[in-house]
Amino acid sequence: MSDTVMEKGKILFAANLQYEFRGSVMVKALQSFGWVVEKYCWWDYIPKSIWGKVQAKYIFGPAVKRINQPLIERCNFMKPEVVFIYKGIYVWPQTIA
């Protein structure tokens, strides 16, 4: 077995990366296996207001739409081999399809 890691492809890692430790271990592990990992933090799309927090807690409203549409656009632009969604409570089934 070779010591060099061959690039396997691209992964879009979608998660709430509001706190860096949540995804950093998984991202580093995927990178160590040769994957090129791009992060997508859906928390960036939730307004920093009481109304935004209510939408995030109860998973409804325009904030959730603002999470899904850019995720689709990022996938269409990046064309990853894998989309890894960690605790995807904000990701609609039609977005996955």
Image (cartoon, grey):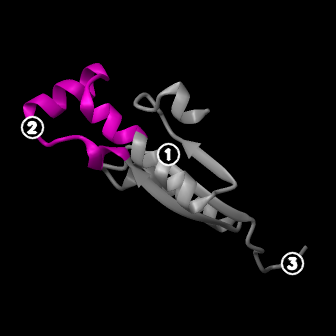
Gap in angstroms between the C-alphas marked 2 and 3: 51 Å
Q: Which residue lies at the image location 9% right of the left edge and 37% below the top edge?
A: 49
Foreground pick, 96 / 42: 96
* Residue beneath the point at 25% across and 31% down: 62
**Mark on residue 72?**
1
Mark 2: secondary structure: loop
Q: Earlier in the sequence, mark 1 or mark 3?
A: 3
Side (left or right) of 92 relative to 51:
right
Instruction: Report crowding for label 2: few under 14, some 14 to 19, many 20 or more residues within 10 A (C-alpha).
Output: few
Residue 1 in the image, given as x and y percentages of width and height: 91, 73
In the rendered structure, which segment of residues is drawn in magenta? 42-68
> How many tags in the picture?
3
Q: Is residue 66 left or right of residue 75?
A: left
- Classify 94 as above or below 84: above
* Residue 35 drawn at (x, y percent): 66, 64
Which residue is painted at 32% across and 32% down in the image? Answer: 64
Say what amino acid the circle numbered 2 marks. Ser
Is disc 3 placed on a helix, strand or loop?
Answer: loop
**Kind of residue indicated by mark 3:** Ser
Q: Circle 2 is placed at which residue position?
A: 49
From the viewer's perspective, is 63 left or right of 48?
right
Give the number of the disc on residue 2: 3
Task: Please give the name of the residue rendered at 36% of the width and 45% of the height, measured from the top-left corner.
Answer: 42
Nearer the observer, disc 1 or disc 2? 1
Please tell me whether the stretch drawn in magenta is mainly helix, strand or loop.
helix
